[in-house]
Amino acid sequence: MAYPKTGNEVFISFSLSNTMFSGIGKGTITREDVSVDYLKELFAKYGVIISAKPEQRKLLEKVNETYGLNLDIPDSLKLIQLSEQHRRLVLISVQGLRRVNGSLLPEYTNEEFQEATFSFVKYYVQSRHYDELVAENAQLKRDLDAEIAERTRVSDI
């Protein structure tokens, strides 16, 4: 499946870095575990941009083979930065593989790849800051409480 080019593609990566978030300014980031079915719908709607090192090719092939995501395998690393257009990042979390200083190794044996399992986490950037959202929520609650008090007020007549 070829995913569309929409201008609002979802970024995919095996790692997370602060530089990915430097393009968003002040905002709120939400994080949620997501299913493969959800990802297929998300990618079909928005498209995909993959940020992976060439040595992670086999990992992407394993993800495609296991989950049928049909992700294109890039020839070189594409640096990504979240922005107003590109608000979504999916992190492919890999378990069961050896690491050095927390980083995946450039190569693994076929036996090691058989032990690998994957999960997916979506990060979404909202352009509004969390503090603004909390303040708006508090104001809405006060307005609702005032309206309820007004409607349930007993008259002295």
Image (cartoon, rainbow, N blue to C red):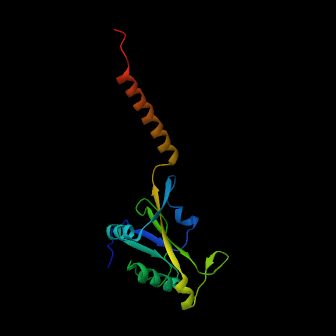
Q: Is residue 125 above or below residue 134?
A: below
- Residue ranking furthest to the right: 101
Residue 32 rendering spot, x and y as whole percentages = 48, 61
Quick check: 100 left or right of 83?
A: right
Q: Is residue 154 above or below residue 125?
A: above
Q: Nearer the viewer, residue 119 or 12?
A: 119
Q: Nearer the viewer, residue 52 or 62?
A: 62
Quick check: 71 left or right of 123?
A: left
When asked about the image quadrant of residue 1, the answer is bottom left
Q: Nearer the viewer, residue 124 or 23?
A: 124
Number of numbered discs visible in the structure rendering: 0
Q: Which residue is at a point 55% across and 72% down the rendered structure image?
A: 15
Residue 3 rendering spot, x and y as whole percentages = 33, 75
Quadrant (top left/top right/bottom left/bottom right) for the C terminus:
top left
Q: Which residue is at a point 40% across and 71% down the rendered structure image?
A: 36
- Residue ranking furthest to the bottom: 110
Q: Which residue is at a point 59% across and 81% down the rendered structure image?
A: 97
Residue 91 rendering spot, x and y as whole percentages = 50, 69
When asked about the image quadrant of residue 67, the answer is bottom left
Q: Which residue is at a point 52% across and 44% down the rendered structure image?
A: 131
Q: Is residue 17 above or below residue 84?
A: below
Residue 61 rendering spot, x and y as whole percentages = 45, 84
